[in-house]
Image: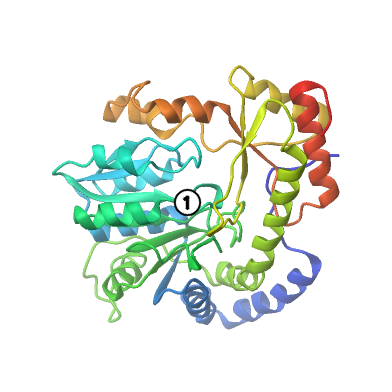
Amino acid sequence: MKIQSSFPFFDDESIDKILPDIKKALSSGVLTGGPYTKEFESKFAQYVGAKHAVAVNSGTSNLEIAMRYFGVKDREVIVPTNTFVATPNAVVFAGGKPVFADIREDTLCIDPQDVEHRITPKTVGLIVVHLAGLICPQIEELVKVCKDHDLFLLEDCSHAHGAMIDNRMAGTLGDAGCFSFYSTKVMTTGEGGMLTTQDADLAEAARMMRDHGQNSQRLMVRLGHNWCMSEIAAILGLHQLEQLEFFVHRRNEIAKLYDSLLKDVKGVSLFKTPPNIRHSYYKYPVKLDAGIDKEKIAATLKAKYGVETGSIYYPPCHLHPFYMENFGARKGDLPRAESVLKQVMCLPLHAGLSNEAARYVAEAFAYSLNGQGV
C-alpha cells in the first residue's frame, strides 16, 4: 500500500460538475476577473462571515498585499517561527522586518507571552498562524495585546479553512485573514488565495494591488502586481467550497480515528483540541519522545510501509540560512520551537483517506516506533 501525506479531493462526481463550467468559461473568452471569480469571492465571504473577500493567485500574494496595506516598510512585524517561510517573506517583500516569536509546546502556535516581550517602538503588527488547522487557542489574548499596543492583527489561515473557535470562523478574528488554496490545502484551486476582511478600505486596496495598482477607472493609483486569480481557479474554488464542510468533517473523523488508535502507543504524544475549537486538520501532527530519531522513523515508514509523512515545520523559520545571514537569527534564540519541532511529524491526512488506510498508517507507525502494533 502506498499512502501520500496529502492529496486533493476531486472524485468523479465533482469532476463531472466542474467540467461544464470550465467549458463555459473557455467558450466565453473571459479567463480572468469574470463572473466565476466574483461568485467565488461572494460565496467565500458569506461562508466565513466576512464583509469582503478578495481572490488572488496565491496565499503568499495576499500576505504581501496585507503587509503593504498596513504599511510595514521600515517597521517590525512579529511572526511565529513555526510557519512556512512565505509568512515572514511577505513582511520582507513589503519592506518590513520579521521578528520571530517562540511557540507554545502544547499547541505549536505562537506564545502570547513571548509576543509581548518582543514588542518595541518599531512594532506595527502581528501575524498569527492557525497551525495545522488549529485556530490559535490564545487568539483573544493576542487580540488584546494588539489593541493595547495599537498593532494590526493578521490571521494566516492557510491551514484553517472551515476552522472555528466559539462558533467564529478563521478569517474573521483579526483585521484580515489570508487563505491559501495550494494543492495540498483543505480546499484547493491548484494555486490561489483569498483575503477576507471587514474593512472596506483594505478590500478596495487589495483589489487594486492584485491588478497592477489600478482602480475601477483603470488608472494606476498605487504600486501593484499581477496577482489576479484565473476564472478556471475560481471554478475549482466554487466547487471545492461546496464540499468544504464535508472535507472538514471527514478530516475530523480521520483525526479521531488516529487519536483512538495511537493514544496508548509508546514513544508518541498526541495534541489535544480545546472543546471550543473546530479543528480543520490540514495536518495531523504528533510529537515523538526525546531521543527518537524522527528522520529514521519517517524513512522506515516510507521505505518499508509506503507511508509518506511530513513536518510542521523544521527547521523553524529563524534557522533558515537566509534569516540567519540577513537578520541575525541564531540557534538558541527560540528554544521551545527548536526543541519541540525537531520531534514533531505529521501523519497522512486528507478527505479521500479511507478508515482502512488510516488504520494501516497507525499500525505501521506503531511498529516503526517500537515493533508493536496499535
The N terminus is located in which quarter?
top right
The C terminus is located in which quarter?
top right
Q: Nearer the viewer, residue 323 or 83?
A: 83
Mark 1 residue element: loop
Q: Is residue 96 left or right of residue 163?
A: left
Q: Residue at x 80, y 34 (%)?
A: 306
Judged from this view, the residue extending furthest toward the left is: 121
**Residue 120 location in percent, x, y?**
17, 41
Q: Residue at x 76, y 29 (%)?
A: 301
Q: Nearer the viewer, residue 42 or 336?
A: 336
- Image: 167 above or below 115: below
Which color mode does the image show? Answer: rainbow
The three-letter code of the residue at mark 1 reads His
Which residue is label 1 attached to?
130
**Residue 236 location in percent, x, y?**
62, 68
Q: Quadrant of residue 328?
A: top left
Q: Is residue 168 left or right of residue 185?
A: left
Q: Residue at x 53, y 57 (%)?
A: 160
Q: Is residue 74 visible?
A: no
**Residue 316 location in percent, x, y?**
45, 32
Q: Is residue 197 left or right of residue 298?
A: left
Q: Is residue 146 visible?
A: yes
